[in-house]
Image (cartoon, grey):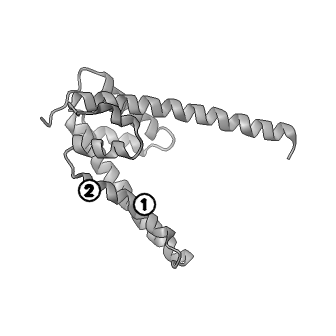
Amino acid sequence: MTSSTTTGTILLFVILSLVTLVFYAFAMTSMMLAFKKARHRNPWIAYVPIVNYFAYLKVIRVSRWNVLWMLVPLITLLPFLDDATASVISLVTNLLVLVLSIWWMIRYFKAFGMNPHRLWWMLLPGIGTLLVLIFQLQIGFSKKYQYQFM
């Protein structure tokens, strides 16, 4: 590996890290604003990874014990599983987490009066996640969407 290739790789890593940080800041700021609309006691908790799931689930009125479902894919790390079994378990558990995440996002949209049919856009390859981020920004920054689960 030449010096210019290494420099280019490091530069690409830095740029992608900065872009990721910007997206994270936008997403968590909109979540914090949504938590304020929901009159959550500590809206700043949106910036704390993992802990923000507890507040998110409280806002959408789902038991905070549901966070444990996010740990289910870790089963594949068990040392006694062979590769084929781990692959099947990984597929099933990741699908479970995906379905739960979509269900929670539907409840989140409904909690703020947004049409949950917009979530179909998240199935678009490449831009689906960006569109969901835009919808979250609308919930956080727009006065049109108010918390309705009071």
Which residue occupies 51% across, 77% down? 81
On the image, the x and y values in percent for residue 105 come to 30, 44
Residue 67: x %, y % from top left:
32, 54
Placement of the C terminus among the 4 image quadrants: top left
Amino acid type of the residue that numbered disc 1 sits on in the rendered structure: Asn
Q: Earlier in the sequence, mark 2 or mark 1?
A: 2
Q: Nearer the viewer, residue 14 or 119?
A: 14
Mark 2 or mark 1: which is in front? Answer: 2
Q: Amino acid at mark 2?
A: Trp
Q: Residue at x 67, y 38 (%)?
A: 13
- Residue at the extreme right: 2
The secondary structure type at the circle numbered 2 is: helix
Picture mark count: 2
Q: Mark 1 and mark 2 in contact (Cβ < 8 Å)?
A: no
Please state if 97 lies on the left or on the right of 59 as rendered: right
- Counting other residues with Cα less than 10 Å from the Cα at mark 1, is it few (<14), some (14-19), or many (20 or more)? some
Task: Identify the residue position indicated by label 1 in the image.
Answer: 94
CA gap between label 2 and label 1 equals: 18 Å
User: Circle 2 is placed at which residue position?
Assistant: 65
Name which quarter of the figure residue 140 lies in.
Answer: top left
- In this view, the residue in front, 142 or 65, is 65
